[in-house]
Amino acid sequence: MSEDLEFAVEKVKQAGILVMSFFRRPLEISHKEGNHPVTEADLASDCFLRDSFRLRFPDDGWLSEESPISGDRLSRFRIWIVDPIDGTREFIQGIEQFSISVALVSERRTRVAVVYNPAR
């Protein structure tokens, strides 16, 4: 397994533990554009992943559904693309059909992809 994939798997599993600490508990929920829900679990997972990946790969770009868009990411050779909770509506409803998704793209090709359902 590549170093990038090993790191991504480790951090996604750790984010899964964090996300599960919120699962089926009362949540703070807000809405972003298009009436899409965002929970405190989404934001906590995003913050954990962003900080972990930036510490390990400071020269890489970052694109996440829950992070502010950074214009400089397109000038980076590698970009991590993240959805800290894919399936937020199901997560809110206590349905075990959600995941944490992370991918690494460089030279317009996916190099690493991790999709993890911590509830299953």
Image (tube, grey):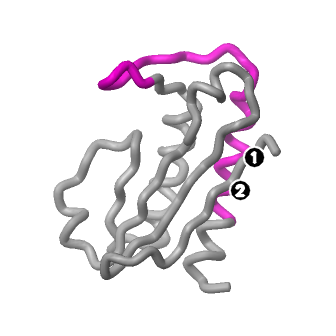
Label 1 sits on what residue type? Pro
Q: Which label is found at residue 13?
A: 2
Q: Quadrant of the C terminus?
A: top right
- Looking at the rendered structure, the number of numbered marks drawn on it comes to 2
Drawn side of residue 74 relative to residue 96, left or right: left
Give the extent of the magenta segment. Answer: 10-36
Vertically, is 23 above or below 100?
above
Residue 74 occupies quadrant: bottom left
Residue 27 occupies quadrant: top right
Depth-wise, is mark 2 or mark 1 nearer the camera? 1
Q: Which label is found at residue 118?
A: 1
Q: Depth check: 70 or 32 in front? A: 32
At a point 36% along the width and 68% down the height, the residue shown is 79
Q: Is residue 18 magenta?
A: yes
At a point 46% along the width and 53% down the height, the residue shown is 82
At a point 74% along the width and 33% down the height, the residue shown is 21
Label 2 sits on what residue type? Lys
Marks 2 and 1 in Cβ contact (< 8 Å): yes
**Helix or strand or loop: what does disc 1 sit on?**
loop
